[in-house]
């Protein structure tokens, strides 16, 4: 018991963050799987129904069950963020590893290109991609994914540059290991703690980016729900039905808070 | 009590009595009566009626200016600066006889010279471009005598009087060289001053030829921030505000009467008849049977709104036929029709909606949900307004779109012309031989009654062929302080302050 308390005291962010994140994910997954309502089913009689046993969080302006919609919306948002980060991390690792390990002309070219992409605010860049490709869930994922690649590439490149002259890499090379074996078997695992914590923070940014894009009406399209989309719908009823916007806002805030603390905690541990 | 004091007291009493008496006689105008009307934007484009483009500017200028004719609240054209007019047999020459004793706000009488100058200026014949494209059809404006002006056209145009009745064809004095900043017209209110981004002051014109305005002073207060409209109304800073949403009206205090009118547009799911499966009339009918308009109204506007069944809105009383019951909601029938058309399992299509129009976005979600019942999957595609204009309206690259279509002038053709096969603005690619034939008859129809009949037949044609999934003419709300009365809705985008009055106590 003492040990646990000590651990928590040493790194409270990690545990509090993990706790909030796990609870939110559990609620969202349970709400999505076990919800008795079709999140898109409308009912004029239940328009802005108050919270009750049938509708634990009440209903929205179309009489749709708010809990089901928040769950499915949260799931969409988390899914978009997850795939975005996977895309960003995968390509980030490949680019970062190649440039960091080999250096030279390729490094110069790719990194200058990287800098150019990083110089744009990520939302603005995603907006450009959306206006080129059109809107929709998968297009949001792809454009956000592209936008997230450079920052991961930069982090991974730094780690590779730090590691490539370390003793264990030199001895691996002496033993005759090939470049790719050294890169992905020897160096990559040593960069994981840093990559992991930045992935969690990146995940957070992706949640916010998806929410902002959907809020602006260019992300997930109705009737599919996502938290940003719901917030934008709720805006019209801010004064008459504040609960709608408030609940959606709190859901986003809790998800972001959870993963933000988790990311900080991981960084501390790394 | 000294003598002086007694006199003072008596004077005071007399004055109070006078005020009380005037208050009792409310409804009539007195020098102090006033109303503050909130408007969402400043009149920035121009106060020159021939230059003003914004609908929000024109609706105010309606009170300052008049044309030879003007619209009344039923949509009829009534004589204004002109007393009467006649058309030559070939339909090319319109002869307007000026009304006696019509004065401009500067006190000068309206002359035939002024009329010629105004029409030529409005038609762009003195330089510049006319804002009314139909005015390029004007060949010449001739002064026949002191009170008669002839307008000669290149080609006959049955809608010409409707264009003459717009604010854009208003009569202004020839000698006013600053119409854009110091407007002078013949309307019931005259312009006093404008403080940019703050307010515009109007004053009653006492020498108005017709029924004079009731309220002496009208202040237009500019409230650009939509969120502060309700606060301004409830706080008493503004007595009236037009075009509120249902949500905004619910937040108003008891001191306001909420008047419900119509937006004068036809909200519908417009179908592109050039793409499959909307080239099949059974599919269009099936969709119309599946969409439950009452349910849409209940979910999106608390049941407010006027279901329509064709491309005409109720305010056009003369032409409107109620066809809203052509397709009562009937899921079985819809499924049957779909099966007959070869889509027993339904199909998938996209509804393009401009994302800045929240009411359309909401209606689209309900429609999409309703169509699921017959196995039709309608995907909503939100686009920016400019993209909508270029892709959908001009480019006709869409399957279906949910939008409101309004009339640009007080003519039935403004609503119905766009469904002719060859019409430039036929963005739905509707092509129906009967419709085209009927439409052609308009040009040969002898009397106005005959034309009205044809307009009604055209509407029935659109309804029978389910040209579009017709929804409603949307409700619009006007908040008016309970101290005032007399607001009238027009079938056009105008505000008529002259009919407003202070309520009888």
Image (spheres, grey):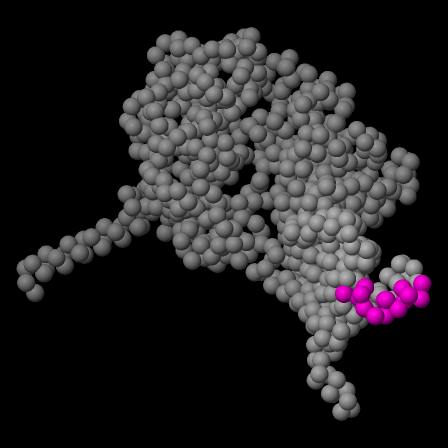
Q: Residue at x 57, y 29 (%)?
A: B408
Answer with the quarter of the image where residue A154 lies.
Answer: bottom right
Residue farthest along the front direction in this orientation: A174
Taking the magenta stretch, the answer to whether it contains residue B199 is no
Asked if A139 appears above or below B194 in the picture, the reply is: below
Q: Quadrant of residue B265?
A: top right
Horizontal and vertical percent position of residue A68 = 77, 63
Res. B316 in view: yes
Where is residue B229 shown, x and y percent of the image?
48, 52
**Picture residue at 92% right of the left edge, 59% below the top:** A178
> Quick one: A217 or A44, which is closer to the camera?
A217
Spot the residue most to the bottom.
A2
Which residue is located at x 87 percent, y 38 percent? Answer: B338
* Residue B505, percent from left and from top: 36, 51
The answer to whether any part of residue A87 appears in the image is: no
Q: Is residue B51 left or right of residue B324?
A: left
Against B414, is B254 above or below? below
Taking depth in this image into account, of B273 and B258 the one nearest to the observer is: B273
Q: Which residues are magenta?
A: A162-176
Magenta run includes residue A171: yes
């Amino acid at each position: 018991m003492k040990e646990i308390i000590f651990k928590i005291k040493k790194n409270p962010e990690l545990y509090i963050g993990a706790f909030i994140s796990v609870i939110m994910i559990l609620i969202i997954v349970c709400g999505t799987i076990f919800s008795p309502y079709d999140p898109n089913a409308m009912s004029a009689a239940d328009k802005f129904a108050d919270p009750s046993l049938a509708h634990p969080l009440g209903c929205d302006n179309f009489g749709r069950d708010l809990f089901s919609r928040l769950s499915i919306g949260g799931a969409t948002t988390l899914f978009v963020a997850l795939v975005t980060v996977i895309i960003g991390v995968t390509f980030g690792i490949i680019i970062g590893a190649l440039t960091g390990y080999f250096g030279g002309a390729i490094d110069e070219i790719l990194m200058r290109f990287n800098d150019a992409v990083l110089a744009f605010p990520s939302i603005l860049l995603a907006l450009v991609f959306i206006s080129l490709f059109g809107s929709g869930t998968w297009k949001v994922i792809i454009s956000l994914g592209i936008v997230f690649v450079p920052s991961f590439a930069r982090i991974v490149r730094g780690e590779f540059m730090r590691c490539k002259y370390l003793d264990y890499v030199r001895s691996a090379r002496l033993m005759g290991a090939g470049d790719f074996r050294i890169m992905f078997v020897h160096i990559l695992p040593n960069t994981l703690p840093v990559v992991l914590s930045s992935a969690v923070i990146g995940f957070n940014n992706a949640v916010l980016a998806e929410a902002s894009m959907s809020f602006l009406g260019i992300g997930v399209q109705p009737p599919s729900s996502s938290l940003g989309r719901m917030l934008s719908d709720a805006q019209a009823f801010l004064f008459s039905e504040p609960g709608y916007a408030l609940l959606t806002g709190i859901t986003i805030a809790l998800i972001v808070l959870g993963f933000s603390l988790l990311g900080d905690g991981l960084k501390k541990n790394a | 009590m000294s003598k002086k004091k007694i006199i003072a007291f008596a004077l005071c009493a007399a004055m109070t009595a006078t005020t009380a008496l005037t208050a009792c006689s409310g409804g009539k105008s007195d020098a102090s009566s006033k109303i503050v009307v909130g408007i969402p934007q400043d009149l920035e484009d121009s106060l020159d009626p021939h230059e003003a483009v914004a609908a929000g500017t024109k609706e105010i200028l309606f009170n300052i200016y008049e044309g030879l004719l003007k619209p009344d609240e039923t949509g009829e054209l009534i004589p204004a600066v002109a007393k009467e007019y006649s058309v030559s047999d070939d339909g090319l020459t319109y002869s307007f006889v000026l009304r006696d004793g019509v004065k401009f706000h500067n006190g000068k009488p309206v002359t035939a010279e002024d009329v010629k100058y105004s029409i030529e200026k409005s038609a762009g014949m003195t330089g510049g471009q006319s804002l009314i494209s139909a005015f390029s059809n004007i060949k010449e404006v001739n002064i026949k005598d002191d009170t008669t002006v002839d307008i000669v056209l290149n080609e006959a145009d049955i809608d010409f009087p409707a264009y003459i009745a717009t604010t854009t064809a208003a009569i202004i004095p020839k000698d006013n060289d600053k119409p854009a900043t110091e407007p002078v017209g013949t309307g019931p209110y005259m312009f006093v001053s404008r403080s940019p981004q703050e307010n515009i002051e109007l004053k009653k014109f006492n020498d108005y030829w017709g029924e004079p305005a009731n309220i002496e002073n009208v202040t237009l207060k500019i409230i650009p921030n939509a969120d502060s409209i309700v606060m301004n109304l409830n706080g008493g800073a503004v007595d009236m505000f037009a075009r509120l949403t249902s949500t905004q009206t619910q937040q108003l205090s008891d001191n306001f009467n909420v008047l419900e009118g119509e937006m004068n547009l036809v909200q519908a799911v417009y179908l592109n008849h050039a793409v499959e499966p909307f080239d099949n009339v059974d599919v269009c009918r099936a969709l119309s049977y599946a969409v439950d308009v009452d349910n849409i109204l209940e979910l999106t506007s608390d049941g407010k709104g006027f279901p329509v069944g064709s491309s005409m809105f109720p305010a056009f009383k003369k032409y409107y036929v109620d066809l809203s019951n052509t397709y009562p909601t009937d899921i079985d029938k819809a499924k049957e029709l779909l099966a007959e058309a070869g889509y027993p399992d339904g199909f998938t299509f996209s509804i393009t909606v401009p994302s800045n129009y929240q009411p359309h976005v909401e209606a689209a979600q309900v429609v999409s949900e309703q169509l699921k019942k017959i196995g039709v999957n309608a995907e909503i595609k939100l686009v920016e307004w400019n993209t909508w204009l270029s892709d959908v309206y001009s480019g006709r690259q869409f399957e279906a779109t949910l939008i409101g279509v309004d009339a640009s002038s007080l003519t039935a053709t403004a609503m119905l012309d766009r469904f002719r096969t060859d019409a430039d603005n036929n963005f739905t690619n509707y092509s129906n031989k009967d419709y085209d034939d009927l439409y052609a008859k308009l040009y040969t129809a002898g009397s106005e009654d005959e034309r009205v009949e044809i307009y009604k037949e055209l509407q029935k044609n659109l309804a029978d062929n389910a040209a579009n999934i017709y929804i409603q003419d949307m409700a619009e709300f006007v908040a008016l302080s309970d101290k005032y009365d007399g607001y009238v809705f027009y079938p056009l985008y105008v505000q008529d302050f002259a009919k407003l009055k202070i309520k009888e106590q």
